[in-house]
Amino acid sequence: MAVTDKTIVLITGANQGIGAAAATRLAKEHNYHLDLTSDSSIAAATTYLTSTYGHLDVLINNAGILLDGTDIPLRKLFDLTLSTNVAGPACLTESLLPLLRCSAQRPRLIFVSSAMGSLTQSLNPSVPWYNGEYKAYDASKAGVNILTANYARILADKEARVNSVCPGLVKTNLTGYTAHGHSPEVGAQRIVEMATVTGKDTDVTGTFSDKDGPIPW
């Protein structure tokens, strides 16, 4: 969680990697343990934020897992992946909606997605992951994009800016610190931009993009 004098920001998965880089860029970090797979943990976090701050200006749903390629049975693989990557952010966002609506600003809601969740790109033989076996992860990120579309509609009356962001291939624990990835700081670039949108991006909502521009759904 990040706090400034004017803006309250909650970033899930901010203990390392992209989330930590985003928290460093946005404000001073305050740690709060949150288990996205636990309704009681989400409720406790909501109670804490309500009693401590009374509002929330920015929510960055960054936490996620990638378990494809392990020896986990397929059904359990999907259960674990979708619970953490889709159900967790959905339940947290739903719980925090009243606090986002209490923001004196135009609230910002960012879902950290992946180009691997793009239906258009998944059918493109030229993308690097075309022959990869990431069924559960890909499905979860497609689900994250649907959450973005839904909450852009739900929060339209508040003129909220709700967007999906792909950080790209980043050297983190999630990717096994792949040599082909860029730094968490580069991965956090577009996330921070969407959390602090100004100028021509002020009215941007319901989009899917990375640091290089729009990504097809």
Image (cartoon, rainbow, N blue to C red):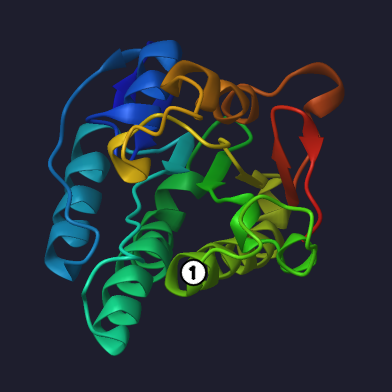
User: What residue is rendered at 73% in x and 52% in y?
Assistant: 127
Quarter of the image that includes the N terminus: top left
Residue 10, image x, y percentages: 35, 36
| Left or right relative to 65: residue 40 | left
Q: Residue furthest right?
A: 200
Of residues 7 and 17, the one drawn nearer to the viewer in this rendering: 17
Q: Which residue is mark 1?
A: 133
Q: From the viewer's perspective, is residue 82 above or below residue 181?
A: below
Residue 37, image x, y percentages: 21, 66
| Left or right relative to 136: residue 108 | right
User: What residue is rendered at 58% in x and 21% in y?
Assistant: 189
Q: From the viewer's perspective, is residue 25 above or below residue 158?
A: above
| Left or right relative to 49: residue 125 | right
| Amino acid type for the residue under numbered disc 1 | Glu
Q: Quadrant of residue 150?
A: bottom right
Q: From the viewer's perspective, is residue 1 above or below residue 118?
A: above
Residue 33, image x, y percentages: 12, 42
The answer to whether residue 6 is visible is no
Quarter of the image that includes the C terminus: bottom right
Q: Residues within 10 Å of mark 1 (few under 14, many from 20)?
A: few
